[in-house]
């Protein structure tokens, strides 16, 4: 049976919303969060607010996109008073998703050029990352969600191994005539964060195994942009032994320097 990805997405979202309303009619968002995280929301004075992250665009060299970044994320920081007052995270996401869909449909390539999948994410058919940033930033502004408080931000998964050149030991960011070393790569990230203040998360920003590059980037980001978090996805590949090896190695380096 052929079925539109939007139909699948709509059915899943309707089931989630229905569960929340049946479980807790007065606060359906609370019920949905507790079901999805398999834990009760703490009742103390400082509960932990849930954070949601949605993939908006998939890009990168491996899938034939001109945009180097592997993924663009929408990050929704939902405060506990939002949940308790009924400010539904799904409704916020719907508004942004609707604005993105409208922008994609009016793009010169049309929606087919962006190849939407069942999760609601698109193939990144833009010419460069700045076009994607503008589309996502405009969609967030159009939703009006950040007018109440800054709850929406942007994350990117870089996956720089796909444009790292082992023989030169550098990154191909601006073409083969202007290769980037680690310092230039870190400066590039800082410029992106300065140009796009909504960016709060970088995932896999340096190639796998580049401990020195990781440390340089942490220092560069923490100096002026403490709100930006750095995460890893591909480095450890969910392998416990690899995690132990790298953790011990980084700890040993830090101890030597101290």
Image (tube, rainbow, N blue to C red):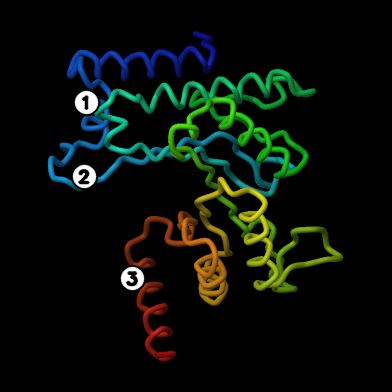
Query: In the image, which disc is placed on residue 31?
Result: 1
Sequence-wise first label, 1 or 3: 1
Q: Which residue is mark 3?
A: 244
Camera-near label (1 vs 2) is 2
> Contact (CB < 8 A) between labels 2 and 3?
no
Label for residue 134? none
Q: CA distance from mark 1 to mark 2?
A: 15 Å
Mark 3, secondary structure of its residue: helix
- Judged left or right of residue 227, residue 160 is right
| Vertical position of residue 253 compared to residue 2: above or below | below
Q: How many marks on residues? A: 3
Circles 1 and 2, Cβ within 8 Å, touching? The answer is: no
In percent of the image, x 53 and y 61: which residue is there? 225
Given residues 87 and 62, the one toward you in this image is: 87
Task: Give yes or no for contact between labels 1 and 3 (Cβ–Cβ under 8 Å).
Answer: no
Q: Please tell me which residue is depicted at 78% across the width and 67% down the height of the picture.
A: 179
Residue 248 placement (x, y as % from top left): 35, 78
> Where residue 11 sits in the image (x, y, percent)?
40, 13
Q: Nearer the viewer, mark 2 or mark 3?
A: 2
- Secondary structure beneath dot 1 equals helix
Above or below, comparing residue 186 to residue 87 in the picture:
below
Q: CA distance from mark 2 to mark 3?
A: 31 Å
Query: Alpha carbon of mark 1 to alpha carbon of mark 3: how far?
Result: 37 Å
Left or right of residue 94, residue 239 in this image? left
Q: Foreground residue, 170 or 27? A: 27
Which circle marks residue 47 in the picture? 2
Q: For the point 66% across and 33% down, which residue is it?
A: 135
In percent of width and height, residue 22 lies at 20, 13
């Amino acid at each position: 049976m052929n079925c539109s990805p939007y139909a699948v997405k709509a059915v899943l979202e309707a089931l989630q919303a229905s569960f929340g309303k049946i479980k807790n009619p007065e606060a359906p968002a609370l019920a949905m969060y507790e079901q999805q995280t398999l834990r009760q929301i703490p009742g103390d004075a400082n509960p932990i607010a849930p954070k949601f992250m949605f993939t908006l665009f998939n890009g990168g060299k491996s899938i034939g996109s001109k945009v180097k970044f592997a993924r663009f994320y929408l990050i929704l920081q939902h405060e506990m008073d939002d949940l308790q007052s009924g400010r539904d995270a799904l409704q916020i996401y719907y508004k942004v998703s609707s604005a993105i869909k409208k922008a994609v449909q009016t793009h010169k390539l049309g929606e087919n050029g962006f190849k939407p999948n069942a999760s609601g994410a698109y193939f990144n058919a833009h010419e460069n990352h700045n076009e994607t940033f503008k589309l996502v930033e405009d969609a967030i502004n159009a939703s009006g969600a950040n007018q109440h408080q800054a709850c929406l931000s942007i994350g990117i998964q870089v996956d720089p191994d796909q444009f790292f050149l082992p023989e030169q030991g550098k990154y191909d960011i601006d073409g083969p005539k202007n290769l980037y070393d680690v310092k230039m790569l870190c400066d590039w990230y800082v410029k992106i964060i300065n140009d796009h203040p909504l960016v709060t998360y970088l995932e896999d920003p340096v190639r796998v195994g580049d401990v020195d590059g990781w440390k340089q980037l942490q220092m560069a980001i923490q100096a002026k942009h403490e709100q930006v978090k750095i995460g890893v996805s591909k480095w450890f590949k969910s392998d416990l032994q690899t995690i132990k090896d790298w953790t011990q190695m980084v700890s040993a380096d830090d101890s030597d320097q101290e």
